[in-house]
């Protein structure tokens, strides 16, 4: 393809709701649910179908972290870099997006454990409900080397790690605005490779195997890589035809690489190309269904572990009490997966969205009051 398929002279493709990036968010959230539920059937999917169902956790987490950096950079980068949104306002907006739902899921698990105990039902794995681990997790500080945070709603470690990334975002951005797109892309790729080599040298394992207690140090290089991809995407136009073929080739390459083994670095390249391609493909007719599916993806992520614990806690009691055959056990497993999707949708519609609407109204009110009081001397938007 001609060199003009990649150019700094053309206007780059803006991201819109209801396009490929939204589709990716929903697909990754759905696969995370499948990964978390795969071991709860009569035979783990990793044993009956393919090991990718077990090892896919690192892959999906990488995707989630890179995509978070990419989307936040493209949505908020210009506002934060231009001073129209302060570092504090950015952090407050992002923190209040994730913390209320996280707290509600934590309280739900506490109620579930206490309620089960009152009925004389003990957890099958009581070590996952150690009360000493709860404070760090509820405070979302478990990814910074602070003791605690294991068990309970364990996947929330990545939300904790992202809190640190939100804090770092404005300061990283200050450095990136001074650089050209190709330099930033090289810095993002090189930063991850350096972090990976450091963990190999210091600990004897790659950066994606960092324990949950040090999750921030795993997340930051991936989040920064996503920011670098976004900065590149905002400055360099990629022909839609090239983006489509590159995205398709990367998706096939990712599937082939994962079929044989982890192939972590190859998979990381494929993930980066998929995200870059998704952001470069125009969306002339945004899909409302895809937009809604993407909006519910956070609820899918934050609630699925709670649903898994509750559903299979009850299912395991039923299986043992009634000696259910294997087909019935698989039906219960499928019902649990469906319940995770249904509960996430209900949580999104009835709880998360109303809370977020109130938070947005409150944040807008806070931003307007100082600006009104100080006009015309200064404005927070200026």
Image (spheres, rainbow, N blue to C red):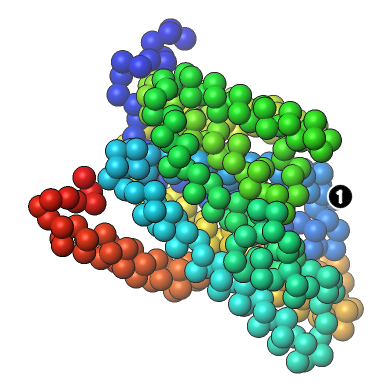
Q: Nearer the viewer, residue 224 or 355?
A: 224
Q: Secondary structure at mark 1?
A: helix
Q: Is residue 246 visible?
A: no
**Does 199 appear above or below 363?**
above
With respect to residue 318, does 345 lie above or below? above
Q: In the current view of this chain or complex, which residue is farthest to the left?
A: 376
Residue 3 visible to the viewer:
yes
Residue at (73% x, 31% y) in the render = 198
Res 363 quadrant in image:
bottom left
Relative to 222, does residue 350 appear above or below in the rendering?
below
Badge 1 crowding class, 10 Å Cα cut-off, few under 14, some 14 to 19, many 20 or more, is few
Image coords of residue 273 (percent x, y):
55, 28
Residue 125 as seen in the image, left or right of residue 191? right
**Direction from residue 63 to residue 77 in the image, left or right:** left
Picture residue at 35% right of the left edge, 42% below the top? 80
Q: Quadrant of the C terminus?
A: top left
- Left or right, 91 with respect to 60, comes to left
**Residue at the location (36% across, 54% down)?**
89
Q: Position of residue 17 (x, y in %)?
A: 37, 46
Residue 276 horizontal/vertical position (percent): 49, 30
Residue 267 lies, in percent from the top left, at 68, 31
Task: Give the tally of numbered discs.
Answer: 1
Residue shown at 67% from the left, 49% from the top = 215
Q: Nearer the viewer, residue 143 or 343?
A: 143
Task: Examine the rendered structure and indicate whether residue 209 appears above or below residue 32.
Answer: above
Mark 1 lies on residue: 47
Q: Residue furthest top?
A: 2
């Amino acid at each position: 393809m001609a060199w003009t398929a990649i150019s700094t002279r053309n206007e780059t493709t803006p991201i819109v709701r209801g396009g490929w990036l939204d589709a990716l968010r929903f697909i990754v959230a759905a696969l995370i649910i499948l990964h978390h539920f795969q071991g709860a059937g009569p035979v783990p999917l990793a044993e009956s179908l393919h090991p990718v169902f077990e090892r896919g956790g690192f892959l999906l987490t990488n995707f989630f972290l890179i995509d978070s950096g990419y989307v936040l950079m493209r949505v908020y980068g210009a506002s934060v870099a231009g001073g129209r949104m302060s570092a504090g306002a950015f952090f407050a907006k992002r923190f209040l997006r994730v913390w209320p739902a996280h707290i509600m899921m934590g309280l739900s698990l506490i109620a579930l454990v206490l309620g089960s105990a009152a009925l004389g039902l003990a957890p099958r794995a009581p070590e996952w409900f150690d009360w000493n681990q709860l404070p760090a997790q509820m405070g979302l500080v478990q990814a910074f080397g602070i003791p605690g945070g294991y068990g309970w709603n364990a996947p929330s470690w990545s939300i904790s790690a992202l809190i640190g990334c939100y804090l770092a975002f404005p300061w990283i951005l200050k450095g990136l605005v001074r650089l050209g797109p190709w330099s930033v892309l090289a810095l993002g790729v090189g930063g991850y490779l350096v972090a990976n080599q450091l963990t190999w040298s210091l600990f004897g394992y790659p950066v994606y195997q960092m324990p949950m207690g040090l999750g921030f140090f795993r997340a930051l290089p991936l989040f920064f890589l996503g920011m670098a991809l976004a900065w590149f995407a905002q400055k360099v136009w990629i022909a839609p035809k090239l983006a489509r073929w590159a995205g398709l080739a990367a998706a096939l390459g990712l599937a082939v690489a994962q079929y044989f083994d982890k192939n972590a670095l190859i998979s990381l390249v494929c993930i980066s190309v998929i995200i870059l391609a998704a952001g470069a493909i125009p969306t002339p007719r945004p899909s409302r269904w895809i937009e809604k599916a993407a909006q519910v993806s956070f609820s899918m992520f934050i609630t699925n572990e709670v649903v898994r614990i509750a559903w299979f806690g009850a299912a395991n009691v039923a299986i043992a009490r009634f000696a259910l055959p294997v087909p019935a056990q698989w039906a219960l497993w499928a019902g649990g997966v469906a319940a995770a999707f249904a509960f996430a949708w209900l949580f999104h519609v009835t709880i998360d969205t109303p809370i977020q609407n109130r938070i947005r109204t409150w944040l807008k009110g806070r931003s307007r009051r100082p600006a009104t009081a100080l006009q015309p001397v200064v404005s927070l938007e200026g």
